[in-house]
Amino acid sequence: MSNAVLTPEQVLQQLQWRYATKKFDPTKKIPESVWKTLEQSLVLSPSSFGLQPWKFFVVRNLEIRQQLLEHSLGQTAVVEASHLVVLAIKKDLSASDVDDYIKRMAEVQQVSVENLEGFGNVVKGFLQKPTLNEDQWATKQTYIALGFFMTCAAMLGIDTLPMEGFIPAKYDEVLDLAAKGYSSVVLCPAGYRADDDKYASKPKVRYPTESVVDYID
Amino acid sequence: MSNAVLTPEQVLQQLQWRYATKKFDPTKKIPESVWKTLEQSLVLSPSSFGLQPWKFFVVRNLEIRQQLLEHSLGQTAVVEASHLVVLAIKKDLSASDVDDYIKRMAEVQQVSVENLEGFGNVVKGFLQKPTLNEDQWATKQTYIALGFFMTCAAMLGIDTLPMEGFIPAKYDEVLDLAAKGYSSVVLCPAGYRADDDKYASKPKVRYPTESVVDYID
């Protein structure tokens, strides 16, 4: 098909090439042109209603990364990877976040804020439902961004490690996220696998396709 | 870098090409060779501990898709898209799911189950933490798979629509998921945009990069 940039075989090959990289080569840095696109894979990720209830903290300061390592169950990727991304949610989403988004939408699409009021009220109504936990909802959106980031990385030959194994409250403290209205939910170190990472050659453990994909005919 | 299959510009171009497709062309079907790779993007998605707490239901039966449309807030993509994927979590994860996984791991990596007991106990301990909501945790993992699926689709020139706007309890009922131990959490119709989908040409609304990406130097 004309809009494809890869063959199915190439996509499959990169999905197989990707693995959760436990040991990064600390001497190899992601070139800026590649990084800028990875950054955009986060920015351009979809989210429900388009609300973007997130922020991505890229920790470059090595002293701070050393501090974070203390709250990362010993996973040295936090300091050794070229880049460390802390994916965070905007806490306690409310009507004012919807107003901000509507304002941005009006700006980008060159329509009036009044024209978007109906849509804004739908989103506000959604956020006010008593059964909704705003933080959990924002977290799910942020995991889509994690998926986009990791997949684009694989296509660009960049290794990643999705990490839930850290102490969010401590990360929030070290990075001063609470004061900014955010809370860390998942991490993704990115860079290049070390030559001696023994996990690189282990076969991927997946259930057989027929047991996780079910066709309803 | 030698492991890349795309340039940063190509990745960016596809991320920009992608949009939440509201109107699919019902006459265009995803070729089987492309679909098989999209299917693998779900199967090969990463999950915490590698546990794969999910199942992907691909609804091909059009009568059933018509039934599901009644519980989809009128979003006709559910019937018009080439493929409809219902991403579902395994409900109430427990120690026996860990045992299943360890068994599979032993098989794929050709080690003994006994060798993996330590790892298995870590995962069991994690699932038993009183602060953990197993279903929420499984849902987050499933959203990574959604991100992988959508990104790979974009690289293959396939349109998608991530959909939270449906009634999970009704979907579970129509597809008889509860009896199978699963629950639907998010949908993703996939196929080809209709020529007259007016959303295709609307500019993407995103906050400026500098307001969602924060460098900590």
Image (cartoon, coloured by chain):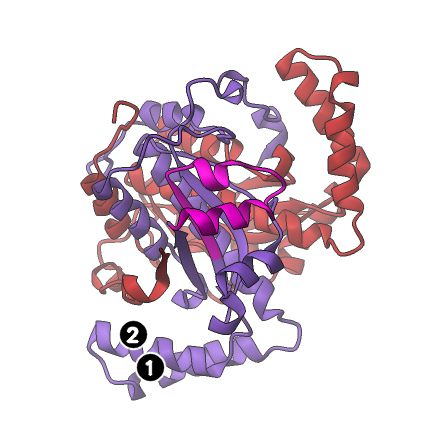
Chain colours: A red, B purple
**Range of residues picked out in magenta:** B61-87
Asked if the residue under mark 2 is in contact with the one under mark 1, i.e. CB atoms within 8 Å, the reply is: yes
Name which quarter of the figure residue B108 lies in: bottom left
Q: Nearer the viewer, residue A27 or A147?
A: A147
Q: Is mark 1 on a helix, strand or loop?
A: helix
Identify the residue position indicated by label 2 in the image: B105
Q: In this rendering, is residue A62 above or below A23?
A: above
The amino acid type of the residue labelled 1 equals Leu
Q: Is mark 2 on a helix, strand or loop?
A: helix
Distance from Cα at disc 1 to Cα at disc 2: 8 Å
Q: In this rendering, is residue B193 above or below A53?
A: above
| Label 2 crowd (10 A; few <14 / some 14-19 / many >=20) | many
Check the residue under mark 1 and report the chain it is in: B
Name which quarter of the figure residue B49 lies in: bottom left
Q: Does the magenta stretch include residue B36?
A: no
Q: In this rendering, is residue B165 above or below A2?
A: below
The residue lying at 39 percent from left, 45 percent from top is B149
Identify the residue position indicated by label 1 in the image: B116
